[in-house]
Amino acid sequence: QAVVTQEPSLTVSPGGTVTLTCGSSTGDVTSGHYPYWFQQKPGQAPRTLIYDTYKKHSWTPDRFSGSLLGGKGALTLSDAQPEDEADYYCLLSYSVSRRVFGTGTKVTVL
Amino acid sequence: EVQLVESGGGLIQPGGSLRVSCAASGFIVSNNFMSWVRQAPGKGLEWVSAIYSGDNTYYADSVKGRFTISRDTSKNTLYLQMNSLRAEDTAVYYCMRFPLAEWGQGTLVTVSS
C-alpha cells in the first residue's frame, strides 16, 4: 500500500505565499497520478479545490493553484487570507480503483 | 446542479450491520465513478470503496469482506452495506463522484456498545 505524505503543518502570513506538497512512497508524483487537493474547515465536509493536477472548480479562489514540483504534487496558496486557515488533503490515483489520501496539512494564517 | 445527500448513519453495536445511502441528483449514478470515503473523529481521510464501469468494485483492505458497495439505478442512489462493524469503523462517511470529486455532506456512523 502506497503512503502519501504531506507536511503536518505550515504557517503563512496574511498576504503571503505557501506551498503544500504531496509525495508518494512509490516514487515521483506525475500527472498520471491525477493529483487532487481538498480543503476542509472544522465541522465541514471537504471541498475540492484542484483536480487532475491543476484544474480548478468554479468555486476555487484564484489564489490557489496546483502543479508538480520536484517529484511531488503541489498546492500553492498566494495572497493568503484568514479564511484559508484549514486542513488540506491531497489524493493520488495509483490505478483505476486504488486511490490514496495524503496525511493532511494544517495551514495556519498568522 | 450536482447534489449528493448521505443518510442512514447512527449508533450501532459492535458486530452489527448498517446501510448508508447517498442520494444523487443532477447526474446518473450508474454512469459515474462513485466512491465512499470516511473520516474517523480527529483523523484524516480514508478511501473506503469505489464502484465504476460495469459494476467493478474496489475495497480498502480494512473493510474488504465486510462492506459492500452498490447502486440502485431506479433511485439514483449509492449504498454502502456495512457488516461486522468494529469500533474502528466509527467515522463520518462521505460519498464522492469522480472525476470532478464532488462531495456529499457526510453521515456519522458510531460503533459502540
Image (spheres, coloured by chain):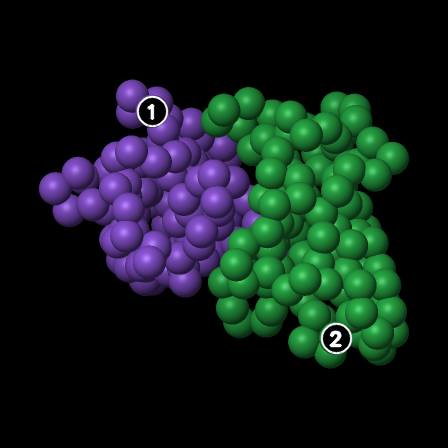
Q: What is the drawing colour of chain A?
A: green
Q: On screen, B110 above or below A92?
A: below
- Seen in the image, is B104 located left or right of residue B71? right
- Seen in the image, is B76 located left or right of residue A26? left
Q: Name the residue carrying label 2.
A: A81
Mark 1 or mark 2, whichever is nearer to me: 2
Q: Name the residue carrying label 1.
A: B53
Chain hosting mark 1? B
Tell me residue A46's x, y (percent).
Answer: 54, 59
Tell me the quarter of the image containing the C terminus of chain B.
bottom left
Q: CA distance from mark 1 to mark 2?
A: 41 Å
Label 1 neighbourhood size at 10 Å, few (<14), some (14-19), many (20+)?
Answer: few
Q: Residue at x 61, y 34 (%)?
A: A34
Q: Image quadrant of residue B49?
A: top left
Q: What is the drawing colour of chain B?
A: purple
Question: Is residue B52 visible from the viewing direction of this image?
Answer: yes
Q: On screen, A12 above or below A95?
A: below
User: Callout 1, which amino acid?
Assistant: Ser
Q: Secondary structure at mark 1?
A: helix
Q: On screen, B86 above or below A108?
A: above
Q: Residue at x 74, y 30 (%)?
A: A29
Name the foreground residue: A95 vs A104.
A95
Q: On screen, A5 above or below A76?
A: above
Chain hosting mark 2? A
Tell me residue A100's x, y (percent).
Answer: 60, 36
Name the foreground residue: A56 vs B36.
A56
Q: Residue at x 42, y 27 (%)?
A: B58
Tell me the quarter of the image containing the N terminus of chain B.
bottom left
Q: Please tell me the numbered disc located at residue B99.
A: none
Question: Is residue B42 visible from the viewing direction of this image?
Answer: no
User: Callout 2, which amino acid?
Assistant: Gln
Q: Residue at x 39, y 49 (%)?
A: B95
